[in-house]
Image: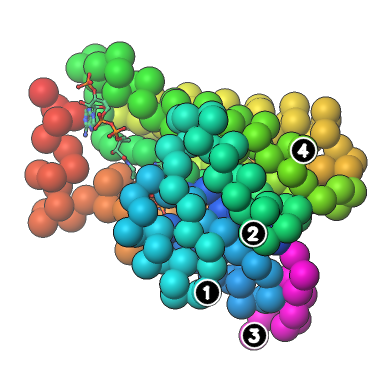
Amino acid sequence: MSAFSDGLMANRTVFVAGGTSGIDLGIARRYAELGAAVAVLGRNPEKAAAAAETFGGLALTADVRDYAATRAALEQATTELGPLDVVVSGAAGNFLAPAATMSANAFKAVVDIDLIGTFHVFRASYDLLRTPGASLIAITAGQAVNAMPLQAHACAAKAGINQLVRVLAMEWGPDVRVNGISPGPISGTEGMARLAPDESTREEHTTRGSR
Ligand code: HXC
Ligand code: NAP
């Protein structure tokens, strides 16, 4: 039984960065079920279109590492759907890799997507929000508070997200609420396939981390 009533999000606009698969798509779909107009953003246009079609949403394409492209996508969402009530920042990248052999660019890639990308999504949305009452939600992870081997990049990035959320909540509240959600491990997702690969996927996801 749902704790939320039908139509709870009617006349609300939601933007989900990373909402073209996995947990973020589940979030986007649920907002749509509750009546919101929802836009989802990913890098792959075909994947975004297919995801948005499953719930009648708006598909947008940008790399969150690119501020101008991220801003353009948020502006398109606002133009087509209206001022934003909820912005979810869930785009992320991850792989298992020992810090001793991880390249500088590998570390940077994950920090750029997760942490810098979250700043880009939130900063670019700031003057597009319907206030007071808008809600910004970052998707963080247990890595933010629990150190994990082979996760130097993700632990650093997600810890940074937690502090970014705290600072933005102080600076932008109370008109804009800023929070982080830390999901537990969700089976069947890309994230879990990469962190706990079974024998069939272990080779694909970990070979480059062991070089
Ligand atoms: C070591 C690796 C690597 C690996 C990539 N790199 N994979 N190093 N082990 N397995 C290195 C590359 O060699 C390169 O460094 C650098 O990382 C950037 O790689 P690119 O492929 O050029 O980057 P890009 O195309 O931008 O792709 C980003 C990515 C990719 C993060 C590497 O995996 C991606 O797009 N992931 C998105 C999907 C995803 O990861 N979903 C899971 C999110 S779940 P060099 O030095 O060679 O240039 C999550 C888990 C939360 O966050 C917790 C769950 C419990
Ligand atoms: P996923 O299925 O891999 O989804 C990642 C999403 O982000 C996709 O829509 C992807 O689309 C998009 N994306 C990736 N890099 C991007 C970029 N540079 N710019 C724009 N979009 C980008 O991931 P998931 O496993 O469901 O995880 C979703 C979120 O939950 C992440 O923040 C993750 O850290 C967090 N989390 C996951 C788990 C878990 O068990 N899976 C646990 C705790 C926290 P494209 O590839 O098309 O860009």
Q: Which residue is mark 1?
A: 56
Three-letter amino acid code at the position of disc 2? Glu
**Disc number lying in front (1 or 3):** 1
Residue 113 horizontal side relative to residue 80, left or right? left
Q: Determine contact: label 2, label 4, CB under 8 Å.
A: no
Distance from mark 3 CB to nearest ligand 2 atom below 8 Å:
no
**Labels 2 and 1: the sequence-earlier one:** 1
Question: Under tag 4, what secondary structure?
Answer: helix
The residues bearing labels 2 and 1 have C-alpha atoms spaced at a distance of 13 Å
Snapshot quadrant of residue 36:
bottom right
Amino acid type at circle 3 is: Met
Q: Please, what is the three-letter code of the amino acid marked with disc 4? A: Asp
48 relative to 119, above or below: below
Asked if 194 appears above or below 206 in the picture, the reply is below
- Which residue is denoted by mark 2 in the rendering? 80
Label 3: which residue? 1
